[in-house]
Image (cartoon, rainbow, N blue to C red):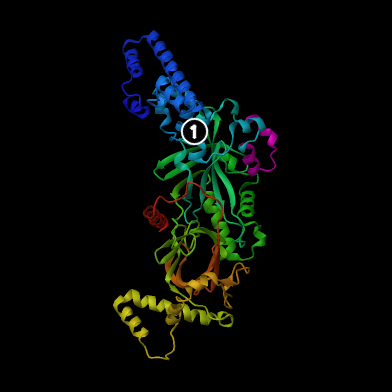
Amino acid sequence: MAVCARLCGVGQSRRCRRRQRHDQHGSDSEMDMDEEEGERIVGEARGGWHQSRTAGPSEAAAAARVAGSPQSLVDLPPELLVEIFSSLPGTVLPNLALVCKKFRQILSTETIWRRRCTEEFGMRDDLRKMEVMGVSSRELYVKRVNPRVKSGRFMKLLPDYEHMDYRDVYAHLLHPYRHILGLWQPDIGPYGGLLNVVVDGLFIIGWMYLPPHDPRVEDPMRRRPLFRIHMWESKKATVECMYGHKGPHKGDIQTVKKDEFSTKCNQTDHHRMPGGRQEEFRTWLEEEWGRTLEDIFHEHMQELILMKFIYTSQYDNCLTYRRIYLPPCLPSDLLQPGLFKGTYGSHGLEIIMLSFHGSRAKATKLTGDPNVPAGQLTLDIDLSRPVQLPDLEHQRSIEELSRLVMGVHEEVQRGSQDPAAASAEAEECSTGAEGSENTPADEAEEAGAGATSSRTEPQPFVLPLGVMARNEVYPRTCKMCFYGTGLIAGHGFTSPERTPGLFVLFDDDRFGFIWLELKSFSLYSRLTDQLEHAQAPNMERFEAMLRNMQSWTS
């Protein structure tokens, strides 16, 4: 009570003393007198406040002397208190309601709680509008899972919006489940994934983000609902599993520990299909790859697809998720960091996270494969070592490109083995005889002078002959190129090693990487979806998250 008194500025006023005497003696008549007196004081204060607004300066001063200036929050008019309370965090409002009857009544105003739902959780829908128009997220997501189901079947199952208010939504839905909002990576072995938990109307939806069908890397991401939480009754939130093809069914969510939670399906029979595993596989293949098994002629690719189906099917009833953050953005970054989707040969499209760390750029896998699992550092780019591409005719030669990149690679290797010798060698090269031929490393260093101009003046680009690309449609101009390494490994992440390659920056939303040893090209395109509640608090937390991700699958 003392804390609340300090918040409202009441202190040891006569009203608080009357309330204390009432608590001690239990006098009902005294409480009635207290409330009547409070209402009289508030009415006088409102009258004086209104008079001071409409009267002239001298009259306002006289009215202030008569009515008295407000001495605490209790003396302010209700409309001003509504504005003040609306700007406070929703977590402190219940304690504020314990101060006095006036505060309790004002905190029943829908405007206050609607603003808290909007500002804290991004809720945009109007409960009254949803009630009148019959717009329902439930109908939308049921139709999304099974388009053959008629929406009319579910109209009688809609929540009772008439007896629901924003305070109930805040207290029983948004606030209890606020810790699961944001980006998460499901623990599905080497395959990983990307889950985004958002507030959508009267629902909290867990969306699994899926890359577009291979090889259309520039197509938008696909989404599939895994679970949802909604207000089925006015004071109770219900968790439902959305997996399978029979519509929503009972589920459960448990918070394992900080930045980790798990989901469980209580009716796994909804995941099964009448045709058994064969029908489930055909349906999964069409959703995952956009084709049938007969359309895939590559035997190794068929094995990888079948392996993924068998492995991921084991997690259809229970999944654990770990929180991930979007990388912080600094003015010095080469381009805006974020999420990208890229081509990975017969493994299809995968999602990576591009981040910048001083003079290095790192691409970490959010989805992976049996060779290089999710969480591993797939690309490591040295931004201090630009590479100047030759003319188009020489770009078509894989030997010429290998000569440039391997020259830089050998210099990096020497520097890592003997930093002092590498420094002396660099100084000797800088004072070398005039007219001597440049080495590949020298040519790469000379590119640094034109790096700034290449940001605004794109140069022609073409893939060398013999380099395989899943998508033949790639940009024909680039802004900058840098030396980097890519991670390759055998099946089961055996014998991992970093192999040299060329990082090619096409524009602010696309880049590529040429894997020299594999003679392969990966094209990456930015994920443009708006992802809320996903920013890293600081760089230290983000780097700690990257280290944890690698340990999950190492």
Prevailing secondary structure class for the magenta stretch in the rendered image? helix
Locate the C terminus by quadrant: bottom left
x, y percentage for residue 398? 54, 79
Instruction: Choose between 53 and 250: the one closer to the eye.
Output: 53
Q: Which residue sits at x=48%, y=21%?
A: 47
Residue at the farthest left position? 420
Image position, residue 258 (x, y; %): 39, 43
Q: Is residue 142 magenta?
A: yes
- Residue 501 in sight in this render: no
Residue 359 picture quarter = bottom left
Is 53 above or below relative to 315?
above
Q: Secondary structure at mark 1?
A: helix
Q: Nearer the viewer, residue 145 or 418?
A: 418
Residue type at mark 1? Tyr
> Range of the magenta residues?
138-158
Task: Read off the residue under disc 1.
Answer: 170
Name the quarter where the N terminus is drawn: top left
Residue 172 drawn above or below residue 371: above
